[in-house]
Image (cartoon, rainbow, N blue to C red):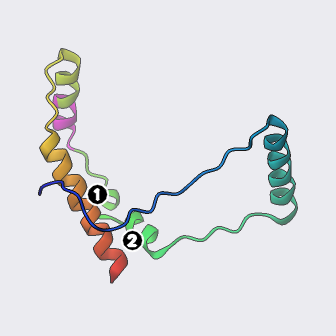
Amino acid sequence: MKIGTSDLPVNVPQTTTPSTPKASEEAAATATSTASSTGVSVSVSNLARSMETSDAASTGEIDTAKVNQVKASIQNGTFVVNPHAIADKLLSNAQEMLNRTAG
């Protein structure tokens, strides 16, 4: 896979920060009093539930030999990062997530 530009819009959440320390304190006090008096409602999406029961998580299998090999190469200073493999995996995972949410 290659990384390139896309015509698709990217939604980046905007965060705002209070302009004064007093505003920050008031916001924190309001949040605390609201949470303590009414509680917080939490729901888990179907996507989160499906991720919870993924194959890797459910089997709990870890290749300890590979972990030890990577650990040793990091300690020796011989660990080499393959940026192409990382980019390919990131794009593959993103495509998989988009396919899950679309259908």
Residue stretch in magenta: 63-69
81 in relation to 49, above or below: above
Q: Secondary structure at mark 2?
A: helix
37 in relation to 45, above or below: above
Q: Is residue 92 left or right of residue 37?
A: left
Image quadrant containing the N terminus: bottom left
Question: Which residue is under mark 1?
Answer: 56
Identify the residue shown where x is 19% and y is 30%.
70
What percent of the width, then of the height, locates residue 99? 28, 75
The three-letter amino acid code for the residue at tag 2 is Ser
| Closest to the observer, 41 or 69 | 41
The image quarter containing residue 38 is bottom right
What percent of the width, then of the height, locates residue 100? 32, 75
Q: Secondary structure at mark 1?
A: helix
The three-letter amino acid code for the residue at tag 1 is Ala
Q: Is residue 34 left or right of residue 70?
A: right
Which residue appears farthest toward the top when viewing the image? 76
Q: Cα distance, mark 1 to mark 2?
A: 12 Å
Image quadrant containing the C terminus: bottom left
Q: Is residue 38 left or right of residue 76?
A: right
| Closest to the observer, 65 or 19 | 19
Question: Which residue is under mark 2?
Answer: 50
Identify the residue shown where x is 24% and y is 53%.
90
| Residue contact between numbered discs 1 and 2, judged by CB atoms under 8 Å | no
Identify the residue shown where x is 22% and y is 35%.
67
